[in-house]
Image (spheres, grey):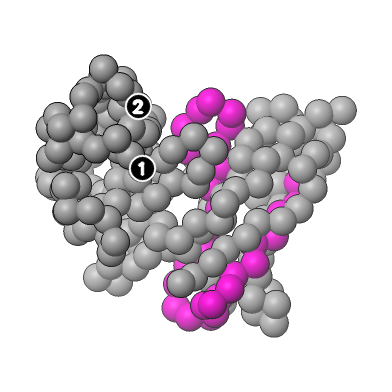
Amino acid sequence: DIQLTQSPFFLSASVGDRVTITCRASQGISSYLAWYQQKPGKAPNLLIYAASTLQSGVPSRFSGSGSGTEFTLTISSLQPEDFATYYCQHLNSYPLFGPGTKVDVK
Amino acid sequence: QVQLQESGPGLAKPSETLSLTCTVSDYSVTGGHYWGWIRQPPGKGLEFIGSIYHSGSTYYNPSLKSRVTMSVDTSKNQFSLKLSSVTAADTAVYYCARVLLFSGAAAAFDFWGQGTMVSVSS
């Protein structure tokens, strides 16, 4: 079975910071990796799919990269509305989510 | 803009069957996409439950497979989830969502319902 891990589990940052979150798969998943943002009490919001494709309507400060077993989500300049929890997800061969990374105010 | 709305009882008793329906608006469930269910226990992460195509083809999370049944009602533009033999561990917010296809493969969930809280308690 494929496992997804995320690091860090918790991240403290300030507005304007460059933030990077890593997702690692226990075996190669090509580029079948998506990233979501979730705010308390809300459904997850798709940010990135196919590792690096920005979902329509998502600000360009979000970007994704990677393939195989290691992937990153980068927020180039953190905005106040970006404080949230971020999940990676693999859907194609064995659907599952990563454990999440909470981005909080420093 | 595709819209999804979950509906169903907010409370289920242990050992009973939890039943939820997702009504899709502004898009047909026969429009070429898979549809899925995801849940999130209070304060915890997201768990994939299963997905279904309008033809009836399904894929269930292996850890839940023995208890899950999904179906589609094309006449009502809805799809449904049944989870049997529930316990307190099934208490969660349940979301329905549409599967985004990319290069012919399932890539992500692009449209989500707002979620419905289901508690399992006697």
Query: For numbered disc 1, what is the local secondary structure?
Result: strand
- The residue singled out by tag 1 in the image is A37
Q: Mark 2 is on which residue type?
A: Lys
User: Percent from the top left, x then y, of residue A98?
Assistant: 35, 35
Question: As rendered, which of B4 and B47 lies closer to the eye?
Answer: B4
Residue A19 makes an appearance in the image? no
Judging from the image, mark 2 belongs to the subunit labelled A
Determine which residue is flagged by label 2.
A102
Instruction: Name which residue lies at 58% across and 73% down.
Output: B25
Task: Point out residue A58 in the picture as x, y percentages from the top left corner.
Answer: 27, 56
> Range of the magenta residues?
B18-46
Quick check: B114 left or right of A67? right
Q: Chain of mark 1?
A: A
Q: Nearer the viewer, residue B44 or B106?
A: B44
Q: Amino acid at mark 1?
A: Gln
Q: How many marks?
A: 2
Neighbourhood count class around disc 1 (C-alpha, 10 Å): few under 14, some 14–19, many 20 upward: many
Please tell me whether residue B35 is drawn above or below residue A20 in the rendered image.
Answer: below
Quadrant including the C terminus of chain A: top left
